[in-house]
Image (cartoon, rainbow, N blue to C red):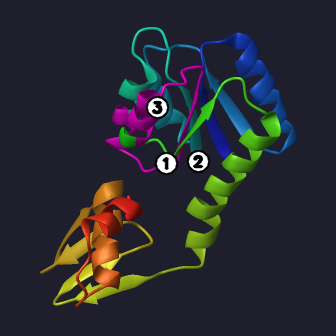
Amino acid sequence: MYRIMMIEDDEKIRRIVADTLKKWQYDVVEVTQFDQVLTDFEQINPHLVLLDINLPVFDGYYWCQQIRAMSKVPIIFLSSRNQNMDIIMAINMGGDDFIQKPFELDILVAKISALIRRKYTYQENENITFNHRGLKLNVTNSTIEFNGQSTELSRNEFILLQLMMRNVGKILSREDFMQAL
């Protein structure tokens, strides 16, 4: 059973979404103390995070950055904000998707299922690595290794390096990089 951490201050929305996800066999943990989200995240260890932007204490962008500093868990923003800049900021801060309120519950469930399937199901069967001149990129855990030293890459670093290693010997345009990101 996959565990979803829901960070939403609107109790009505939180209840409806949590009840729906529980019907789909997800374990939903609702955050109600909005000043200790990171501590809750570490204890809950979720497979996916649903995150509102407008929260008391700190906003969702802040919490997304804090979570991204320690995890690559999928994050879906749920927000009533509808400006393009809000969506761009959410994705650039590390969010994987943005769903504007009000939303259809079946679309939310479909997006959650797709993210979880991509993150956990497909990766279980893959152990892909790329090697080039001693640099080893491990696709499964987004790490690089060179001369016996290993480090974990950010999401964008991983995307860019994987694109370059898949296209060794080819010239890539700025558009190629932007499209990948």
Instruction: Check disc 3 and report the residue beneath it.
Output: 84
Q: Which badge, 1 or 3, is on the more N-terminal residue?
A: 1
Q: Nearer the viewer, mark 3 or mark 2?
A: 3
User: Residue 169's quadrant in the figure?
Assistant: bottom left
Q: What residue appears at the point 46 percent right and 41 percent down from the top-left corner?
A: 95
Report the amino acid beneath label 1.
Answer: Val
Are there few (<14), some (14-19), or many (20+) residues within 10 Å of tag 2?
Answer: some
State whether residue 111 is above or below residue 124. Answer: above
Q: Position of residue 45 (x, y in %)?
A: 53, 42
Residue 114 is tagged as none
Instruction: Check disc 2 and report the residue beneath it.
Output: 47
Instruction: Check disc 1 and report the residue beneath it.
Output: 73
Q: CA distance from mark 1 to mark 2?
A: 6 Å
Q: Secondary structure at mark 3?
A: helix
Residue 5 vs residue 20, the one in the foreground: 20
Q: Say whether marks 1 and 2 touch (CB < 8 Å).
A: yes
| Outermost residue toward the left in this view | 147
User: Residue 32's quadrant in the figure?
Assistant: top right
**What residue range appears in magenta?**
65-91
Q: What residue appears at the point 70 percent right and 34 percent down from the top-left corner?
A: 28
